[in-house]
Image (tube, rainbow, N blue to C red):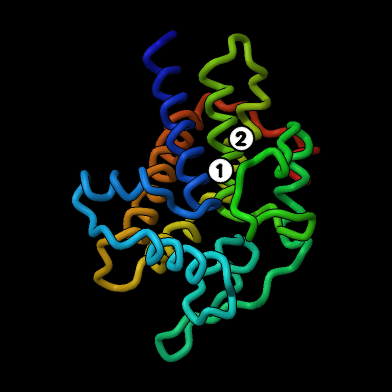
Amino acid sequence: MSDKNAEIIEIGQLAVTAGNLLLNEPVGFFQEGLKQTGYTVSQQSVVVQQFYDRLGIPQSGLYIPPYEHVFRKGYQADGIYHFPPAHHDGGADVEAIYSAYGFHLNDINTSVLFKGANIPGDHLGFILVFTGSALQKIGTEKNIDERFIGNIHDFINNHLDDWVDLFCQLLPPENDRGYLKALADAVQEAVDLTRCWHNSELDSVIPPTPAINNA
């Protein structure tokens, strides 16, 4: 395996990990990782509640929506961000792309908060798991269809743009150095590396197929 392919696989693994962190309550070993990397460690019950308040329960008053179609429609008034409610079909565009490549949301291990037929597929966690899985496929398979690679570039361009940067900025409270900051940093790192791959490969990419591009 070439160094280039190994790097693509590693980026894909980071994206999948970041996506899973957004989709699941923090567990004990993640807390241990926080301590080792200089983040503030809180009681397990505290960080689990932060997960629910920040990512899972719109009525918490602390909620930052992880759904692309919701977050993009947010607006700021008097220093406070406001977001509309999610729509059950708000992720239809990305769900069509998932379906085209046999990526099924029910196969992803998630918190009970993100299970069910009405959960939009444009949750950032799902987007990252899909993108990371695709990158691992690109790095692993020989003679891969260049149009598949083009479609993944198009997906990254459309769904991992600057809305994710603002999401990562808003996710941890100001001056937070604990779980939410570590989560935001993990997501931002994975997205930044994914974009680096995307930008470095653009010159050699075959344009995406219209059927997927317009899904």
Residue placed most toward the observer, 77 or 115: 115
Q: Give the amino acid type for the residue marked by disc 2 in the picture.
A: Ile
Residue 98 on image: x %, y %: 72, 40
Disc 2: which residue: 152
Residue 156, numbered circle? 1
Residue 3 on image: x %, y %: 37, 14
- Is 185 placed left or right of 157 in the picture? left
The residue located at (52%, 45%) in the rendering is 20
Residue 77, numbered circle? none
The image quadrant that residue 69 belongs to is bottom right
The image quadrant that residue 166 belongs to is bottom left
Q: Give the amino acid type for the residue marked by disc 1 in the picture.
A: Ile
The residue located at (22%, 46%) in the rendering is 37
Answer above or below: position of 65 versus 31: below
The residue located at (41%, 42%) in the rendering is 190
Answer above or below: position of 114 versus 133: below
Residue placed most toward the observer, 53 or 164: 53
